[in-house]
């Protein structure tokens, strides 16, 4: 089992190494004593969860206790120590119970080779596309899925989909023949909720993603609409390898969680350059205080670059491009930070 596998490569500029480097940059000195203390506490946390599962204790209570205890442990250990503890958690016998959850299992195993792929989001969206896998889960797996799909992170992701559709609709209402670009679009599930798309108010909606499976899914699902599925990545955008044109609205909703600040700044600058006058760029990033990072980084094997409002503002402050207006806000449950920049 590979700990903190993120895959993709230098082509995308989203790599396991970039996240590891970000983690190490924040590391303070740690000692063998701290590691031993962490190992002892982790062993207790995981043992309690295993015993609860084996005793058929209420699953929701077991999961709540496990996620809270993992979070407490993560919050009080150094990043390097936590990375070590996460690798131990992933091979603990309790994982045999947790991986029965189709959401946790898909995230951990990464069938597409990287974290946070579009089908993982479909599990979070409870989308019909994953009905077969959900229905095939064991009774225990179904109960754990009922917990993970209701976790703060999942709630925030579903809200993010709704907000993205609302932003697209607002742009379409404000500007005739509006053009939209989604970067790291995944399956573009927000388009299913867009009134602007349904009423043909958009000139084009470009869905750019580096995963050919996602590109194919979007192309098939929205055939005959103004949506254009394009294969591309952070590197192709920064390198101007594609002539995508200019847009009234550009957004990157699931990408900045994996980008080091230097790359995030460069991508933001490039996106602002691709906007028409008065255009808007939206970026989103998971908040580091969401409360379930411990579970996501261990049993879901889903490492992210968690940011604070100040971290997101720091990206904006380093951008060397005129910005007429900017706003940094959070979603309703506080799990995702949004920055909207207007040129």
Image (tube, rainbow, N blue to C red):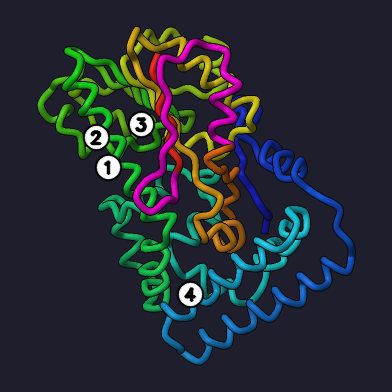
Question: In the image, is residue 114 above or below residue 277?
Answer: below
Residue 160 in picture, x, y percent from top left:
35, 43
Which residue is nearer to you in this view: 324 or 16? 324
Q: For the residues carrying marks 3 and 1, which lies nearer the camera in this image?
A: 1
Q: Which residues are magenta?
A: 311-336
Residues tagged 2 and 4 counted as in contact (Cβ below 8 A): no
Query: In the rendered structure, does residue 330 fall within the stretch colored magenta?
Result: yes
Residue depicted at 24% across the width and 22% down the height: 171
Q: Which residue is mark 4?
A: 63
Does 50 sit left or right of 203 as displayed? right
Could you give the CA–CA distance between mark 4 and mark 1, rounded to whole angstroms? 27 Å
Q: Which residue is mark 1?
A: 162
Question: In the image, is residue 110 above or below residue 300?
Answer: above
Q: Which residue is mark 2?
A: 166
Could you give the CA–CA distance between mark 2 and mark 1, rounded to whole angstroms? 6 Å
Q: Residues within 10 Å of mark 4 (few under 14, many from 20)?
A: many
First-in-chain label (3 vs 4): 4
């Amino acid at each position: 089992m590979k700990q903190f596998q993120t895959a993709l490569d230098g082509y995308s500029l989203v790599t396991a190494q970039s996240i590891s480097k970000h983690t190490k940059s924040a590391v303070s000195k740690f000692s063998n004593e701290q590691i031993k203390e962490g190992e002892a506490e982790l062993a207790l946390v995981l043992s309690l969860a295993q015993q609860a599962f084996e005793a058929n204790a209420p699953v929701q209570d077991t999961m709540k206790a496990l996620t809270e205890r993992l979070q407490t442990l993560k919050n009080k250990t150094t990043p390097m120590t936590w990375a070590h503890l996460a690798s131990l958690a992933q091979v603990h016998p309790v994982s045999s119970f947790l991986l029965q959850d189709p959401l946790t299992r898909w995230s951990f195993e990464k069938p597409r080779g990287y974290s946070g792929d579009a089908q993982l989001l479909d599990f979070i969206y409870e989308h019909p596309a994953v009905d077969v896998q959900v229905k095939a889960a064991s009774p225990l797996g179904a109960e754990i899925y009922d917990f993970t799909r209701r976790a703060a992170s999942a709630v925030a992701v579903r809200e993010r989909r709704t907000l993205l559709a609302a932003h697209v609709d607002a742009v379409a209402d404000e500007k005739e023949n509006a053009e939209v670009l989604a970067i790291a679009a995944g399956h573009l599930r927000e388009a299913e909720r867009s009134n602007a798309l349904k009423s043909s108010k958009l000139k084009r909606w470009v869905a750019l993603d580096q995963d050919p499976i996602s590109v194919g899914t979007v192309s098939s699902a929205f055939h005959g609409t103004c949506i254009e599925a394009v294969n591309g990545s952070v590197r192709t955008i920064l390198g101007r390898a594609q002539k995508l044109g200019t847009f009234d609205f550009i957004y990157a909703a699931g990408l900045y969680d994996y980008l080091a600040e230097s790359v995030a700044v460069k991508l933001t600058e490039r996106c602002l350059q691709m906007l028409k006058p008065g255009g808007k760029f939206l970026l989103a990033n998971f908040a580091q205080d969401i409360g379930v990072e411990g579970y996501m980084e261990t049993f879901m094997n889903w490492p992210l670059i968690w940011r604070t409002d100040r971290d997101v503002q720091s990206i904006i402050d380093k951008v060397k491009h005129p910005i007429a207006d900017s706003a940094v806000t959070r979603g309703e449950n506080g799990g995702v930070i949004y920055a909207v920049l207007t040129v």
